[in-house]
Amino acid sequence: MEKEYKPKKQLYNNNIITLHNLYNLYLHYKINKYL
């Protein structure tokens, strides 16, 4: 039920978290590659 009240904000937050996680993975991979 809660999802119906504010779906857009939830989607926005999920996208931010996903982008953040992908960026962290990318940095992690990049750093490990050069170590």
Image (cartoon, grey):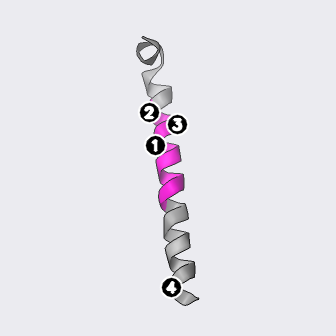
The mark found on residue 11 in the picture is: 2
Q: Earlier in the sequence, mark 4 or mark 1?
A: 1
Q: Earlier in the sequence, mark 4 or mark 2?
A: 2
* Quarter the C terminus occupies: bottom right
Q: Which residue is identified by label 1?
A: 15
Residues under numbered marks 3 and 1 in contact, where contact means CB atoms less than 8 Å apart? yes
Magenta-highlighted residues? 11-22
Q: Secondary structure at mark 2?
A: helix
Residues under numbered marks 1 and 2 in contact, where contact means CB atoms less than 8 Å apart? yes
Between 9 and 21, which is closer to the camera in this rendering?
21
Q: Which residue is identified by label 3?
A: 13
Please say if 24 is above or below 5: below
Q: Which residue is identified by label 4?
A: 33
Q: Nearer the viewer, mark 4 or mark 3?
A: 4
Please name the amino acid that badge 2 sits on: Leu
Badge 3: how crowded within 10 Å, few (<14), some, or many (20+)?
Answer: few
Task: Please tell me whether residue 13 belongs to the stretch shown in magenta.
Answer: yes
Q: Earlier in the sequence, mark 4 or mark 3?
A: 3
Q: Position of residue 34 (x, y in %)?
A: 55, 89
